[in-house]
Image: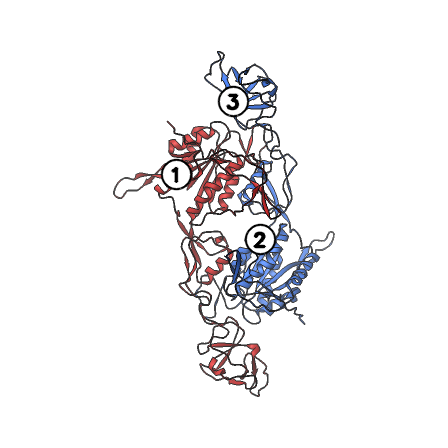
Chain colours: A red, B blue
Amino acid sequence: MPVYLHDIPLEVAQQRFTEALQEVGLWGILGSEEIPLDENAVGRVLFAPVWAKISSPHYHASAMDGFAVRAEATAGAQPGHPVILAAVDGEDPGFAYVDTGDPLPEWADAVIPIENVEPLDQLGQPGPDPRRPAVIRIRAAVTPWSHVRPIGEDIVATQLVLPSGHVLRPVDLGAVAACGHAVLRVARRPRVAILPTGTELVPIGQPVSPGDIIEYNSLVMAAQVGQWGGQAVRYPIIPDQFDQIRQRVLEAAQTADLVLLNAGSSAGSEDYSANIVEMSGRLLVHGVAVRPGHPVILGMIATQVKVPEPGSSPGEMPRWTPIIGVPGYPVSAALTAEIFIEPLLAKWLGRKPNQPEEVRAVMARKVVSPAGDDDFMRVAVGKVGQQLVAAPLSRGSGVI
Amino acid sequence: MPVYLHDIPLEVAQQRFTEALQEVGLWGILGSEEIPLDENAVGRVLFAPVWAKISSPHYHASAMDGFAVRAEATAGAQPGHPVILAAVDGEDPGFAYVDTGDPLPEWADAVIPIENVEPLDQLGQPGPDPRRPAVIRIRAAVTPWSHVRPIGEDIVATQLVLPSGHVLRPVDLGAVAACGHAVLRVARRPRVAILPTGTELVPIGQPVSPGDIIEYNSLVMAAQVGQWGGQAVRYPIIPDQFDQIRQRVLEAAQTADLVLLNAGSSAGSEDYSANIVEMSGRLLVHGVAVRPGHPVILGMIATQVKVPEPGSSPGEMPRWTPIIGVPGYPVSAALTAEIFIEPLLAKWLGRKPNQPEEVRAVMARKVVSPAGDDDFMRVAVGKVGQQLVAAPLSRGSGVI
């Protein structure tokens, strides 16, 4: 005998779902994979912290075009009393021209920018190649490490570059590359199966007759799932036939991490969903006190997975797959996705859930909500003087 | 003799670039293409407005599970004086059970929710099938269009659904599907060629020696271009050799809509870029007064395109391709992309350029900028009491 749990508060529903996921070890990151460090890494979530393998810079680098010198050799140089350094053959030539980014020679500890040096030939005249002078004249002393970017100025090897759970942005890819990584370990993308049901549904692009409803909830939810870091698989429309729906649910539950069962709008369709979940696993929640969207169903589907047992015949163990029965009305469906699916995907990816930007505003008109329900309302927000005012939009749950 | 245009103000640089693009007809949407209405449409920019082909709902639909009736037949019904309607054979049966979403029968003009109706059998008792009663007893009159969603309640055919230039979000796909579209005409994605140059560069994932610089600017810029709606092609690293660089630039300019030439950090590399642009087309700007990033180069590359001339041999006409010489330092490169590339891609896609969120804050310490430069600074913003305070981050342009 089915026990229906009608319109329980949102928090209770979320808690019941979370606990059921915890019991079967599905309240955490689902897994990880290694991906190459390329543009497709944007939006992926780091599974492990990224530590610097090499420093950046990974050598003492000249920060300017100029001459590498030993700072002590310039001691005492003043505008009226220049110091003159002459090139010496051997390992320590005394000075050497360097471009920005060039490594500092071993014997040097500072760089003098080229505009502060007079490069001269043997006769004390500007020579033909200012980068290979015989002597250089310096009119100001420099301190050690002047115009040098020392090893690890930006990042020191072993330092934390990015924490786990970080969602990669374009500039992050540069930081990861700079510290010596060519691959990344990221959370694997949760697989979400989306099953639209309803005899009245017709696919996008087909002619419609009165009573036909164009099926686009699966498209909107697939796009949402993609934006939230999941991988959606859209199933073809299933007519309102109990056995067909149940068969598809069990099929989807075997490969997906999450099954979304989008109920038809006809009477009984929602009960089908609840019954299927009850027959095939555990019905946790049937109806949540949120508007729009209260006919949400939360549950777990059990399928059998064959496991080889060492030294004996293969056994079977249940595989639990969460299922969300999503209401058929478009606005309810999109809101259900935001309330239940986005936070679950965030948990499975190890990232923070999206926080919608919050503003406080005064309602433009009085709105009555059913007692005990969390009423989500789409509003247009505008500024009147210093005051933010929110004007409720039409409540029809068919309007997106 | 090259004319170098050093460090002109940002606005002047942008204007000069815009005018040059206007002259050759490249300051507008580059083109459009038709794409199927699926999840991959998210983020694409509408080339033309979307008008509703069909209304939503596209028929008078029941808004409740209940009985369709003619409202006038319920006139006078009161709790103590119910009206009883008996089923009649024929085209106008007097009442008919409807599910939510079902089309309203032609003869009906209102729906009474099932909970407000007593469906009875011939003997005046609740019958075996409450959806097919012999009579219904009604204890409250209804007005025409009660619990009916009339044709076009959400969207009326021919109505504007989304304007051109709109960037598609998941819910938009639903709205477009609901009003009868299966394909979308969107702006085509601009092709951006990214050419890293520099003998000191090594690809990501290779061992590095002192002086080697890991090439990741092309990766960061490719990811940025992707996020802004363009299609990036990363070229292999080109050593600092004038002819090789020039050849690759001309090659890239023949197929790309925009060429990004990322200068090496070695002396002369930037002059190579300027000379190549000058030799191969028009050098518009060499140096912009923004920090970090001032060695930006803006120009146009001319390549020859063969065009068949009617009735004669094929002629040639120049194809102009804008080129941006991007500084080698990572922070400069990323900033240059934001200042010059993002707005250009926005123009080519027909969407609004990104507006970074603006806040006003007090600087945590005094900062000195060179006079006449627009100084972009990365800061950490925090709240101290009621006051937003911005603390400047390290200025090294190597840190991302």
Tell me: A265 left or right of A159.
right
Q: Nearer the viewer, residue A102 or B334?
A: B334
Q: Amino acid at mark 2?
A: Gly
Q: Amino acid at mark 3?
A: Asn
Query: For the residues tagged 2 and 1, is the chain the same?
Result: no
The quarter of the image holding the N terminus of chain A is top left
Up/down of B79 relative to A33, above or below: above
Chain letter of the residue carrying label 1? A
Which label lies toward us, 2 or 1?
Answer: 1
| Number of numbered labels in the structure image | 3
Up/down of B37 relative to B251, above or below: above
Q: Amino acid at mark 1?
A: Arg
| Corner quadrant of residue B182 | top right
Tell me: A205 left or right of B203.
right
Query: For the residues tagged 3 and 2, is the chain the same?
Result: yes
Residue B51, image x, y percentages = 64, 39
Residue under pointer 1: A16
The answer for how far apart the CA atoms under marks 2 and 1 are is 44 Å
Residue A47, image x, y percentages = 41, 52
Residue under pointer 2: B230
Up/down of A261 relative to A226, above or below: above
Choose the circle earlier in sequence order: 3 or 2: 3
The answer for how far apart the CA atoms under marks 3 and 2 are is 57 Å
Residue in the picture at 54% in, 39% down: A377
